[in-house]
Amino acid sequence: MNTIRLTTLAKKESHRFLKVWMQTVFSPVMIALLYFVVFGAAFSGRVSNIEGISYLAFLVPGLALLQSTSNAFQNPSSSLIISKYHGTINDMLLAPLTPLERTLGYFFGGMLRGFLVSIIVVLVGFFFLPDFFPSSPFLLLSLLFLVNGIFSFLGTLIGLWGKTFDHIAGLTTFLIVPMGFLGGVFYSLDALPDFAQKISLFNPFLYFVDAARFSCFGTSDISPFLSFGITGVVFSLCFFFTYLAFKKEWWIKE
């Protein structure tokens, strides 16, 4: 693996969103801010503490992931679709990049965008909750890296497969967004009926959010070992399939 080739692709993918940082970074943070204001004003006094945690603090880890993962997904997927529209996808085919360099280059751009959003959302949480501080900062940073990496890999796969922006929009609307909103961002798993709890266990986003809450508060609805284990397995699978897609040049030559 050539570090110059890898860093060149990673810089290209990072500069894409940093040039329009108001739209790509602070726009999702503004949405998270509105969630804090609305839920803080409307529900904080009406919803009792959840496992000893105020409802507003309970929202911080889930909102950080909800806003960041969609951005981590959009960065590589939109980049690849745009390159297909403009015909510059051939530049990637002709460039002396190995499958691993392509995989990590697109991964870094999406992961960095999502990671920045999630960190800023957590900092916004500090503004509303001065006493809030993650009980395990290292665990939280590691989790944010893994989860945003997962959605960066997914965005790369969808970008390779898709031919139009409708394909990205369809996956985002009917898969990514529902998975996030139904992943325990706004509620505890114990608040659901038994059948809904069993269905929710098939949603990987539930384990991501639960692991984030454990990193922040030291409490969780699910075993933290299971949550972090599933996160690590999903990350490894997404990396493998993205690498395989570049190695076999699936969909690219089309």
Image: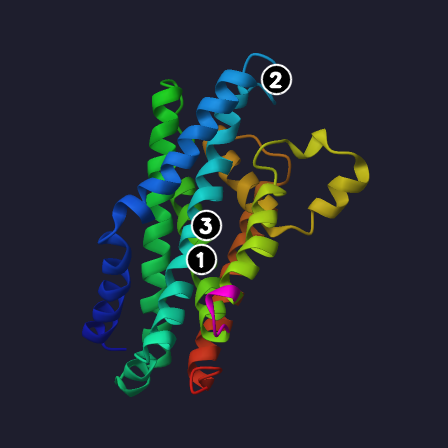
Of residues 51 and 173, which is closer to you in this image?
173
- Tell me the amino acid under the disc marked 2: Val
Q: Please tell me which residue is depicted at 53% across the width and 56% down the height of the picture.
A: 172
Whether residue 79 is in magenta: the answer is no
Q: Do the residues labelled 2 and 3 touch (CB within 8 Å)?
A: no
Q: Position of residue 65 (x, y in %)?
A: 47, 43
Q: Distance between the residues labelled 1 and 2?
A: 32 Å
Q: Provide the secondary structure element on which disc 1 rests.
A: helix
Q: How far apart are marks 3 and 1 (CA)?
A: 6 Å
Asked if residue 13 lies left or right of residue 43, the reply is: left
Mark 1 residue crowding within 10 angstroms, few (<14) / some (14–19) / many (20+)? many
Q: Inspect this view and state whether residue 148 appears.
A: yes
Q: Do the residues labelled 3 and 1 touch (CB within 8 Å)?
A: yes
Asked if residue 13 lies left or right of residue 41, the reply is: left
Whether residue 165 is in magenta: the answer is yes
Residue at the disc numbered 2: 47
- Tell me the amino acid under the disc marked 1: Phe
Numbered range of the magenta stretch: 162-166
| Nearer-N-terminus badge (2/3) | 2
Q: Inspect this view and state whether residue 149 appears.
A: no
Q: Please tell me which residue is depicted at 32% across the width and 84% down the height of the picture.
A: 90
Q: Is residue 105 above or below residue 88?
A: above
Q: Provide the secondary structure element on which disc 2 rests.
A: loop
Residue at the disc numbered 1: 73
Quarter of the image that includes the N terminus: bottom left
Residue at the disc numbered 3: 69
Q: How is the image coloured?
A: rainbow
Q: In this view, does 160 lie above or below 169?
A: below
Q: Please tell me which residue is depicted at 50% across the width and 74% down the height of the picture.
A: 161
